[in-house]
Amino acid sequence: MKPRNVKRLALAAALAGLVSAGNAADLAPLPEPKFNAAMAEMGKYLFFDERLSGDAALSCATCHNPQKGWSDGLPLSKAYPASEYFRNSPTILNAGFKKRFMWDGRLDGSDAGTLVRDMITEAHTMNMDARLMQERLKQVPEYNEMWLKFRKDDINGMRVFNVVGEFFKSIVSKNAPIDKFLKGDQSALNSTQREGYELFKGKANCVSCHNGPLGSDGNLHRTGVPENPEVTKDPLRHITMARHYSTSGLPNYMNTHEDVGFQAISKNPKDKGKFATPSIRDLKYTAPYMHNGMFRTLDEVVEFYSKGGGAGSELKPLNLSDYEKRALVAFLLEGLSGDPVIVEKPKLPAYKVRAFGKN
């Protein structure tokens, strides 16, 4: 083959690759979850056990309630007694597939154990010392028996976090119409939802950030969501935000009266107002929306995006018609939401006095 033809073929291949890459962004079916079943079973008990918090009054399920889409249904989350939180509690549905954890993207999505440690040990969430936690759990014979199914040592506080994290990986969406549609069942979405899907991929361009199995690119973006006034109105929430900035090392944090998002982690002013792209699965169960719960309904969310977001947004106005907004909401609300994923709180085993010499 002549060198000129080789170059032409190479250029054609490169252009084809660019076209393919440009069209590659789309939603995808959820993969099968992978987790250690024995660890996840113990993790289920620990997830609901209030003894994992400092005052034994809170559990992971307090803010991630299965009956409320694995969130708490509040605009801004509650916190450890005598404090209040300054962000919305995100759902843990499909957490095992995330690239990043936390609204400011500060934790690696491949490390669920660190996420659990962060939530259990932070003073404004569950305020627990891992050493005290492990001693509490050792006082429960049933927990010792569960532990020995996957390890041959004593319950260890640092490894307990991984056990709860393994349970997180087992919480996965079920029977979402979009999964059936993407696998070839054209009847899984009705005509309005299919129109919404086309808008999602086309004119609305939601797919540029909301793609893959979760409907999230795992990156951080600035959309200009308005501040939730309760954060500065409520001293307890403001104090929690200031403490977060202090421990993150944000310069001049005492004079910061808005949620700066990823900037608190990167310290780069260019990252001010950037937040992790959330999953858009099971939106039917996870209102209110955004990092500060400022939008009660998906209609409000779509209207916000149609106008191009808020101050400093990276978005451009979409100028969707009323019908297009309704079609998009129909797709997002019904097409991406499957059956409710409910796990009932198990009967928690009680403390029992340990026999001397058999510890």
Image (cartoon, rainbow, N blue to C red):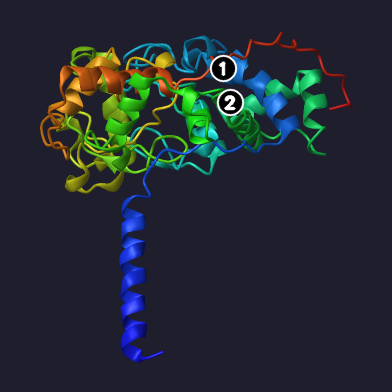
Where, by quadrant of the figure, is residue 53 drawn?
top right
Circle 2: residue type: Ile
- Vertical position of residue 29 compared to residue 91: above or below: below
Position in image of residue 304 (x %, y %): 18, 23
Position in image of residue 4 (x %, y %): 31, 88
Which of the labelled discs sits on residue 324, or is there none? Answer: none
Identify the element where label 1 is drawn: loop
Where, by quadrant of the figure, is residue 261 drawn?
top left
Q: Is residue 257 visible?
A: no
- Vertical position of residue 342 compared to residue 114: above or below: above
Which of the labelled discs sits on residue 341, or is there none? Answer: 1
Please give the name of the residue rendered at 32% of the width and 38% of the height, measured from the top-left corner: 207
Q: Residue beneath label 2, please?
A: 171
Circle 1: residue type: Val
Position in image of residue 6 (x %, y %): 37, 84
User: Relative to residue 349, is residue 223 drawn left or right?
Assistant: left
Mark 1: few/some/many CA within 10 Å (<14, 14-19, 20+): some
Question: Could you tell which of marks 2 and 1 lies nearer the N-terminus?
Answer: 2
Please give the name of the residue rendered at 34% of the width and 36% of the height, measured from the top-left corner: 277
Please give the name of the residue rendered at 54% of the width and 10% of the height, measured from the top-left corner: 57
- Distance (Cα) linking label 2 and label 1: 7 Å
